[in-house]
Image (cartoon, rainbow, N blue to C red):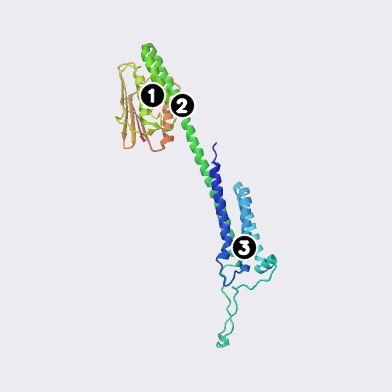
Amino acid sequence: MKQISPRLTNRSGTAQVVLIVFMWMLLFLMPVLTGDFDDEIDWTHVIYIWKEYALIFIMFLINRYLLLPYLLFKGKRLLYGIILGLIVTGFVSLLLFTPADEFVKKTFNHELKPPHNEFMLPKPDPTMHQKDFKPFDGPKMMIPPFGNILIMSLLILGFDTGLVFSNKWMKAEKNKAILEKENVENKMAFLRNQISPHFFMNTLNNIHSLVDISVEEAKDSIIRLSRMMSYMLYNAQDKQVLLHKEFDFIRSYIDLMRLRFTDQVSINLTLPEKVPLINIPPLLTISFIENAFKHGISYEESSFINIQFVLIDNRLFFEVTNKVFDRKRNDENSGVGLTNSINRLDLIYGSDYKLVVDKTENNLFVVKLNIPI
């Protein structure tokens, strides 16, 4: 089984590390860069915010490297939610019971200046009446002190969990795409390997019949077969072959089949006069042609096989028509090549092709195939 390229994995991991480092650096710089300070930085306020971020960072590490891999991704979702909730509650409570001033004093062991943004009572104005003076209470806080840290914790932990999930999903999708591609390639190779022996078995039977009729024709048939084998070995194993080479292969096969039958069998092949330099998957139609020779030839009655290829508007139209003769056959491999060709069409084109297999009232068997080129 193929795995994701280590280079792809390293790129994804490096990008994620850079994003996380940038996020935390920006988060710790924001209180200094965006603070509303008059003369100098209010380190009491900044350090207290850094304390909040430090606790969130510890929760971030616990969530990413312990809770996610060992609980959530192991299917223990309820336990993960309970433990994460307890950790967030504990860290928020720790902040509530440690005031900013006490924290700074204990940490840096120095006296602090009163914060510049502390709301001071205005001095009385002599011109004002005592009854008109009302002390300024300061703005009312809409969010309680623990609300900011709680919201920030949930946002960061949620973002990080989503980032880890998206990374795992991308890896899973890449693995899925690689496995699907590998599966299709294996199926294609399997189907081609089944078509090859099936085709050569029938062709060798034809040459065996020619040996008793004409040695020279048998020798010529062996030369034709060697060319066809070369095509099967060196070209048909490719995903795409030139269209004119595929036509040459079909022409050689039909010429070889003509040597086996008398004039009572009419074999007509129509190919485009001008063949563009385009590629198609190899051996798409040979099984349908084989099937026509297998079931559409009679040594007692006049029979015919009409094969036609037409190019119209970036589409290739193939049609083979033959009369069906009822006779009992004991061939275990009968229909193997035909079934494999249909399976290949499904794998290659999906729904972008049209195949019609029909038996008419006057005992005619018609196969029509339309594929993009």
Q: Which circle's residue, 1 or 2, is located before the other in the chain?
A: 2
Say whether marks 3 and 2 touch (CB < 8 Å). Answer: no
The residue that disc 1 covers is 290
Q: On the rendered image, what quadrant is the C terminus found in?
A: top left
Q: Is residue 142 above or below residue 240?
A: below
Which quarter shows the N terminus? top right
Label 1, label 2: how many angstroms apart (C-alpha)? Answer: 14 Å
Secondary structure of the residue carrying tag 2 is helix
Q: CA distance from mark 3 to mark 2?
A: 69 Å
Residue 145 shows up from this direction? yes
Give the x, y percent position of residue 178: 50, 39
- From what the image shows, is residue 51 above or below residue 326? below
**Disc nearest the viewer among 3 and 2:** 3
According to the image, label 3 marks what residue? Answer: 50
List x then y, in percent, for residue 348: 42, 35
Which residue has dot 2 on it?
194
Point out which mark residue 270 bears.
none
Residue 139: % across, % down:
56, 73
Q: Earlier in the sequence, mark 3 or mark 1?
A: 3
At label 3, the amino acid type is Trp
Q: Work out whether residue 268 or residue 27 is closer to the camera in this orientation and state it.
A: 27
Left or right of 119, for residue 267: left
In which image quadrant can residue 300 be found? top left
Please tell me which of labels 3 and 2 falls first in the chain.
3
Q: Is residue 283 above or below residue 70?
A: above
Of the pair 59 and 86, the residue shown nearer to us: 59
Disc 3 to disc 1, how far (Cα)? 79 Å
The residue depicted at 60 percent of the width and 77 percent of the height is 120
